[in-house]
Amino acid sequence: MSTPPTYVPEFKNPCWYEYGNMSEPTLHCLPFFMILGQNKCGTSDLYPSILNHPDVIPARDKEPQFWARHRHCYCKYDYLPCFLLSWIFEIDSCGNLTYSFRCRRSKPWTLNQYVDFFKATAKKIKLLSESTIQTDNMHHTEFITGEASPSNLWDNRWWWNYDVNRYDTEPPALTNADYLRHFLPNLKMIIILRNPVTRLYSDYLYISTGKVSPQRFHQEVAKEINWFKDCIRYHDIRYCVFRNSFNEANVRSTARLQNGLYAVFIEEYMKLFPREQFHILRLEEYSKNKTGEMKKIFRFLNLRDSEVRFTFTRRNKGSRNKTDMLPETKALLTKFYKSYNVRLADLLRDRKFMWID
């Protein structure tokens, strides 16, 4: 499927009928909303909280990872160079991915496979739409569904796999945002963020394997900042950030510095979607007043009022999180992110996204 389906206007959620040889047409659906991120910013708490609303039907899982990853053949072995994989395993690849890495035992998803991710959801929407029962004068076609793959916001590492980008050196002509705009022009997007300094350390503790320490974290941050400076000396910032690594020698870095450059990613989406299709909030407010923030989100999704009260549960509070980063690391990162936080605050016209509180 290369062209968007014709959505049935009677449904609030983007759905369409497929007429085959079956006696009844099959209803297919795509998400009405997406939580775009960012990692370690509370998406795992936010998504099930939205599902608590009686008019939201869950998808098969929280993170299908289609738009940013699986449609390119997402590779769990992407630290091995393609020639080594080919030599050891004698396998066919699914395409030349960023840094000339290839995938093992995997094929790209088609859009139809992504549609199948919402198959059970579509069946339920169809069943409810055919029901004569109504609640609070609400038609059952008002039910919606969504997904929460944070990678859709920031993971553009395969941008040069797109045909239109294939021979571009920089910057990419098309990213994830362009494809979402093509298939889901009315998509509602929720973006939850936190102070990029604390987000980075939390992410480091989460993705690291083996021994972790504030000292190791500082060393990794210092390397990443130097490589970032080298990259933007020769390239556009979009080129550097969308490659997901500032240096090919360190593509497995545990200090994913670029993920905190929120403005660069959000600008990409706001070039294509109107501002009213975004709801952007901070984890800091969400964790303190979850019920109030959820009411705002339900209004943004045009859902009826809900009397559910929410409490925020912080995850991953294990022993790995007990040691703070070094003061010099915090100072280094605060300086690094400062101009990008200002850029984000200007973009959103909200000073709280400078994280100076």
Image (spheres, helix red, strand yellow):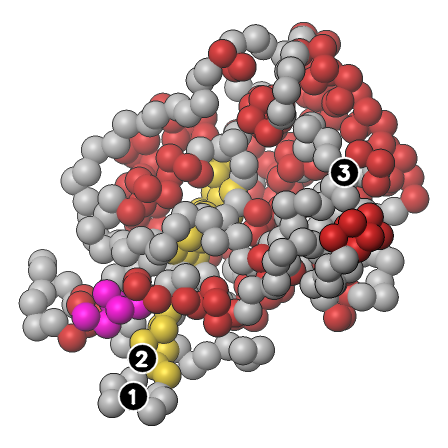
Residue mark closest to the camera, 3 vs 1: 1
Above or below — where is 297 with respect to 19? above
Q: Position of residue 158 (x, y in %)?
A: 71, 56
266 on left or right of 258? left
User: Which amino acid, mark 3?
Assistant: Val
Q: Name the residue that disc number 3 marks.
A: 251
Q: Nearer the viewer, residue 229 or 80?
A: 80
Q: Name the residue that disc number 2 marks.
A: 26
106 on left or right of 333? left
Q: Name the residue that disc number 1 marks.
A: 22
162 on left or right of 11? right
When asked about the image quadrant of residue 165, the answer is: bottom right
Q: Position of residue 338 (x, y in %)?
A: 69, 27
Are circles 2 and 1 on residues that touch, CB within 8 Å? yes
Q: Judge whether residue 315 is colored magenta.
A: no
User: Which amino acid, mark 2?
Assistant: Thr
Circle 3: element type: loop
Name the quadrant of the N terminus.
Answer: bottom right
Q: Nearer the viewer, residue 91 or 52?
A: 91
When asked about the image quadrant of residue 13, the answer is: bottom left
User: Which amino acid, mark 1?
Assistant: Met
Q: Residue at x 54, y 14 (%)?
A: 320
Above or below — where is 68 with respect to 312? below
The answer for how far apart the CA atoms under marks 2 and 3 are is: 43 Å
Residue that lies at the very extreme toward the right in this rendered image: 234
